[in-house]
Image: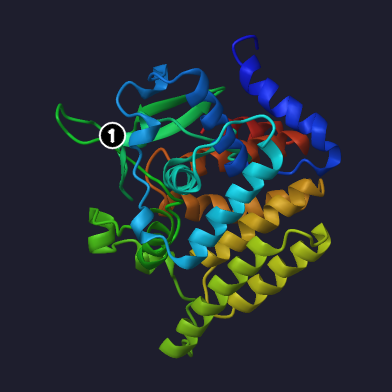
Amino acid sequence: QKEDWPMHKLECSAMCAFGQNWNPSETVRLTARILAKQKTHPERTQSEKLLAVKEFESHFDKLDNEKRELIQNDIAALHHFYSKHLEYPDNAALVVLFAQVNCNGFTIEDEELSHLGSAIFPDVALMNHSCCPNVIVTYKGTLAEVRAVKEIEPGEEVFTSYIDLLYPTEDRNDRLRDSYFFNCDCRECIMKEKDKEKLEIRKLNDPPSAEAVRDMIKYARNVIEEFRRAKHYKYIELLEICELSLDKMGAVFEDSNVYMLHMMYQAMGVCLYMQDWEGALRYGQKIIRPYSKHYPSYSLNVASMWLKLGRLYMALENRTAGVKALKR
């Protein structure tokens, strides 16, 4: 607590000044902390043994107008909330710093993969991405722990995953291009071996046409984006979006299709928030088996789902099933 006082002091002063109007984004808060730390520690810190923040890749030359505008909005917010508490470099340097944070920041999650915040770990940021990773990154307080999930030979490159690996190759690479400006060339992206299972179509006497499948995939991507943006909806309305989309997609997709699983997961989250334990359990039971098939071995997504199920069974006084799930 004493060691973190300089960072706390930075935000405490600003929060007291703005009161209820204090609402900078996580990216703005993280960037403010970086600037403050660079001021008090101009030399490399303990977490910069291999790579300094100033050496981060920014992909500045690849930013489109929309991304540049978002960065300018973040810079305006930084000045608005921290102008009396920080010294800034010029605008060009701030644009590069925000671009670096966007490309190299980590999303911090708890054991159930609930969002806790954002951070940077310079040395961990050295690892490249693969959709077939040989390590996973977990978080304990302010530490990032890197754990091998495969045998790694001396001299072999260490790969982590930058994104959620549930989705098919095209979706994964869309996300990688949008956030990190590259396409993945790992074995999974070249062979696309899991794509057919991930996009499984319902087995019907009169199977849907290729056009109907394409239209439903387009609908699924749109409804996922709609749900992501629906921040001010009531929870009962969010659950209705999930249920209606599942009914519509279920006419074409199997329950194991990743777009069905995505909306089931969202519905489960809404049920948990509403303390509808039975509803959450029903969705979780549908999700866990396909998750185990679609995700790589030792996936944190699968582990967190077993943890959720175990806690739900316990809450519903099914101790036997709860213990079994928690031991997975």
The relative height of residue 149 versus residue 6 in the rendered view (above or below) is: below
- Expressed as whole percent of the image width and height from the top left, the position of residue 252 reads 53, 79
Camera sees residue 135: no
Q: Quadrant of residue 241?
A: bottom right
Query: Is the residue 50 above or below the residue 310 in the image?
Result: above
Residue visible at 62% across and 55% down in the picture: 265
Q: In the drawing, does residue 130 fall left or right of residue 99?
A: left
Image location (x, y in percent) of residue 216: 53, 80
At label 1, counting other C-alpha atoms closer than 10 Å, the crowd grade (few under 14, some 14-19, many 20 or more) is few
Residue under label 1, please give it. Answer: 150
Residue at 65% over, 57% down: 266
User: What percent of the width, then of the height, locates residue 19?
Assistant: 84, 36
Looking at the image, is 73 positioned above or below residue 78? below
Q: How far across and how far down the image is residue 221, in percent?
A: 54, 71
Pick the front one: 264 or 113: 113
> Along the line of sight, which residue is nearer the eye, 289 or 151?
151
Q: Nearer the viewer, residue 290 or 155?
A: 155
Q: Give above or below for 247 relative to 150.
A: below
